[in-house]
Image (cartoon, rainbow, N blue to C red):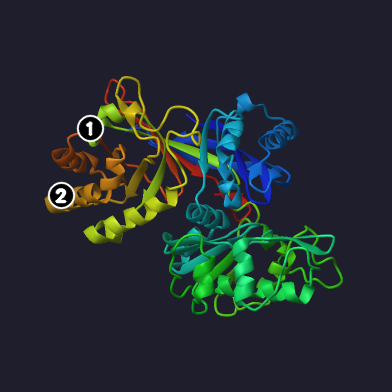
Amino acid sequence: MRETLLSVGIDVGTTTSHVVFSRIAIDDLSGGFTVPRIEIVGKEVFYYGKVHFTPLLSPTRIDAGALRELVATEYERAGIRPEDVDTGAVIITGETARKDNADEVLHAMASFAGDFVVATAGPALESVIAARGAGIDELSKQRGIRAANIDVGGGTSNIAVFAGGELESASCLDIGGRLLRVSDRSVAYIAEKLALLAAAEGIDVRVGERADLPKLKRLADAMVRVLEMSVGLVPATDSYFAMLTEPATPPGAIQALSISGGVADLLGQPLGGQDPFPFGDVGLLLAEAIDRSQLFSQVERISPKQTIRATVVGAGMHLTELSGSTIEYDPTVLPLKNLSVVRISEAEQADDEALIAAVQTKLALYAPNVAGSSNTPGPRPGSSPGTGSASMPVNSQPVAISFPGYSNPTFEQVQQLAGALIAATEQLRADGNPLVAVVEEDMAKALGQAIRASLREGFVSIDGVHAKDGDYIDIGKPTAAGVLPVAVKTLVFEKNGEES
C-alpha cells in the first residue's frame, strides 16, 4: 500500500523565515506476513521558498499578520492549497522563540495544515535539530567519531555534539549576526550580553557612535573565540559561561566540525572593498572572523548538508502498527499527541544512574514547549474525553522515552529498567504526565507489567518503534483488537543532494 503524503516545513527564525514543501512516500514493508510496518520509503523536497526577513512589529513582538501573509504567498507560488497538506512542522527558533507573542504566531501558522508538529524549539533542542539538518549526526555514526555542528544565526549560535550517532551534548550561546545592528554607518543596537562581552574584551562600543570597522572586527573575533570554547578547541573562560543561554560544560575533543545557519552562507566572502554591513548587522564580519579563526585548525571541516535551512527543510511522518500482544498500557491516558522524544542510548539504559541523569538532562531541552498551551493546537497531549485527563496541569510537558531495550531480557534487566524509568520520571508524573516508554526490542509487555506493579496507572509501554531525539510521537486509542496506532513524526533533512 504505497501512499504519498504532502508535507510542509515552516521555520520562523531570529533573522529569516522560509517555507519548504516535500513529498513523502510511505509503504508497508512487512511483506504481508507479519504485523504491518509502515515506514517512509522516499522523500523529495520539490519546493524551496524564498528566504524572508522575519517581520517584526517591535524588538519584542513578531508581526503575526505579516508572517501569515508571507506563508500564504509561498503556498500560492508553490501551487499548494492548505487543505492539500497532510502533515508538516512549524518551528519557532532563536530569539524569535523569546518574543512576547510567539504563541500567537504558532496559532496563526497552524491553520496552514492539518496535523502539524508545532513547537517553540528551546535553544538546546534547536541545536539538535540544526545538527541533524546539517547531517553531522549521520556522519558521526557512519565514521564512529565525535563531531559537532555550530548553527550560527542572527540571535544565537546553537552547538550540538554527536558521538557515534548519539547526541552527547547541546548548548546555546547568545552570539549571532544581528546582535549588533548598523544604520547609516552608526551603531543602532547592541544586545546586552554582547555589550558585556565587548566591555570584558576592552572594546568600547556604544549605540549612536560611528560604526568603527577595526573595533567591530575585534568584537567579531571575540565572539568567535567563544565559539572555539564551545566545542572544546580552546579552554573556556568566563566569557564562554557569560554568553551561554543556560548552563553547559564545553565538550571534550572532537574530530570534525560543520557550521550551519545564516552566517554559514557568508563564509568565504572576504570583505575587500564591499560594504561590511550589507544586512545592517555584523553577520559578514562574524563570518570573516570564523574564516580566520582556529575553528578548523585542529579538526576536519565538514560541509553541512544545509546551511540557512538546516533547522528545518521539511517534515515527514512514518506510521507503525503495533500488536496488542506485545504492549502494555493504561487506556485512560490515550490518545497522546505530539510527545517530544527523549532518546536513551544502549549504554545509558544499562545503568540506573546514567539513565536517570540522561532523562532528567534531556527533559530540560523541552522546557519551552508548554503542553496544553497555545503552543500546541488541538487536544492537549494526554487528553481524551471522559478520562479525567483534562485536569492535567497546564504547564506540564509530556515526553516519550525511547531506548533500544534488550533482545532477550532477563527478569533483573526488566526490573532494573522499570525502576530506573519510574525514578527518572518522578517529577514528570507529579506534574500529571504519563510515563511513556518506547522500546525497539520486543519487550514492552514485560516492561509494562513491571511498571504497572509499581504505578498501576498512568503509563504506556510499546515496542518495535525507533524514535530519535527531535522526533515527535503520537499514540492513538486502542482498536477493538487492542492495537495501538503509532505515528513517529520526523523532520526531513537533505543528504548529499537527495532527501534522507
Residue 460 in view (yes/no): yes
Image location of residue 145, percent across then percent down: 45, 69
Residue 409 in view (yes/no): no
Residue to which mark 1 is pinned: 325
Q: Secondary structure at mark 2?
A: helix
Rendered view: 299 above or below 489: below
Q: Which amino acid type corresponds to the residue marked 2 in the rendered image?
A: Gln
Query: Considering only order in the chain, which callout, 1 or 2, is on the residue closer to the N terminus?
Result: 1
Q: Nearer the viewer, mark 2 or mark 1?
A: 2
Question: Is 467 on the left-hand or right-hand side of 120?
Answer: left
Q: Which amino acid type corresponds to the residue marked 1 in the rendered image?
A: Ser
Image location of residue 204, percent across then percent down: 70, 74
Residue to which mark 2 is pinned: 415
Q: Secondary structure at mark 1?
A: helix
Q: How many marks?
A: 2
Of 492 and 251, nearer the camera is 251
User: Quarter-wise, where is residue 180 in the image?
Assistant: bottom right
Measure how far apart labels 2 and 1 are at the Cα level. 20 Å
Image location of residue 300, percent across then percent down: 56, 74
**Residue at (76% x, 68% y) in the render:** 269
**Residue at (72% x, 67% y) in the render:** 206
